[in-house]
Amino acid sequence: MNSFLQNVWAKRVISLINLAYVAVIAVLTYATFLYDLEFKQNSQFSFLLVYVIASAVFLTLMILTKDEFITKIIGVLLPPLVFLFVLFNLGDWVLIIPAFIVAIVIFFAASNNETLKVILGTVYLLIYVLGLIIFFVINFLFGGSSVETRLDSNLANSPEIYSVYAEQIDDINRVNFKTTANTGSDSDFEKDANGNYIDNTISPDGKMQFYIADVQDNNVGKIALYVIPYGQDKNFKFFSLKQKGVKKTVYNFERGEVPLVAWKDNNTLEYQAKGSSKVEETYVVLPEKNYFEFLGIS
């Protein structure tokens, strides 16, 4: 085994294999710039286990090939790449900590010139410190403090908001599922051939979806009606990539009063505030994607 690891060609091949780790981090960085990464139910631990083991294995391979040119390049390029990865996933420690550790360790372990390490180390430190400070400042100035909670079947996971709408669960269900009547009975909800309730929120052509949400901002509340793209999410074994940066605010209602909402056609929403006899409608055109949503800029 030692003779194999001492073989120069074996080390060069292994150093090439190390590029796979960089490629995965690069793909995840790009993906989380465009999408929100959400772990599937009961999958986060499994992903973390695989992710940590893979990071440890690749870090070991990088250290074994620290003298190879490709590994030296990886040691230089991985820290700034991981900075972007951290920026797009700040707070999601499951994602960023293993990659951050690999980047820091290989930066110091790779056999690059010590002067180069000092210069780049100083530059990278400034990038991380100043970059994060600028990120937090922009979020503070433009991000706002509103807290949004969807009014759907997952509402029970937010006990404080659930208590506000506990007596309107039937109204919330009627917003989210198609009905044949309006009496509040479960038998009113339409079902498909498989016995599942038919989604009322998806446009007839399947391109858009509306949802209503409770929005709190400094004790000022409202129910907002939003429209987002539908069918653009990407599903993988452990997580899903949810489209972000494309959202249209259609109307704002008084907090605590669940409205009636339905699609009139592929682009027109009909909505009626609770207690009102007036039915309004809006022709919906989705805005261009906001690539700076991660900064809190809307």
Image (cartoon, grey):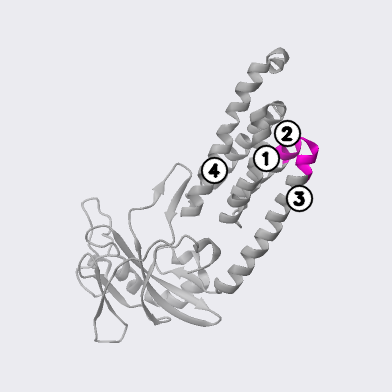
Percent across and percent down for residue 83 are 63, 51
Question: What's the CA distance linking mark 1 and mark 4?
Answer: 14 Å
Q: Which residue is mark 4?
A: 26
Disc 3 vs disc 4: Cβ atoms closer than 8 Å?
Answer: no
Magenta run includes residue 110: yes
Percent across and percent down for residue 39 are 50, 50
In front: 69, or 220? Answer: 69
* Sequence-wise first label, 2 or 1: 1
Three-letter code for the amino acid on which mark 2 is drawn: Ala
Magenta run includes residue 12: no
Left or right side of 184 for 117: right
Residues rendered magenta in the picture: 105-118
Question: What's the CA distance linking mark 2 and mark 3?
Answer: 17 Å
Residue 22 quadrant: top right
Disc 1 vs disc 3: Cβ atoms closer than 8 Å?
Answer: no
Percent across and percent down for residue 180 are 19, 68
Three-letter code for the amino acid on which mark 4 is drawn: Ala
Disc 2 vs disc 1: Cβ atoms closer than 8 Å?
Answer: yes
Question: What's the CA distance linking mark 3 and mark 4?
Answer: 23 Å
Does residue 98 appear in the picture of this structure? no
Q: Residue at x 27, y 64 (%)?
A: 200
Q: Which dot marks residue 37? A: none
Q: Which residue is mark 2?
A: 110
Local SS, label 2: loop
Q: Which residue is mark 3?
A: 122
Q: Which residue is mark 1?
A: 76
Disc 2 vs disc 3: Cβ atoms closer than 8 Å?
Answer: no
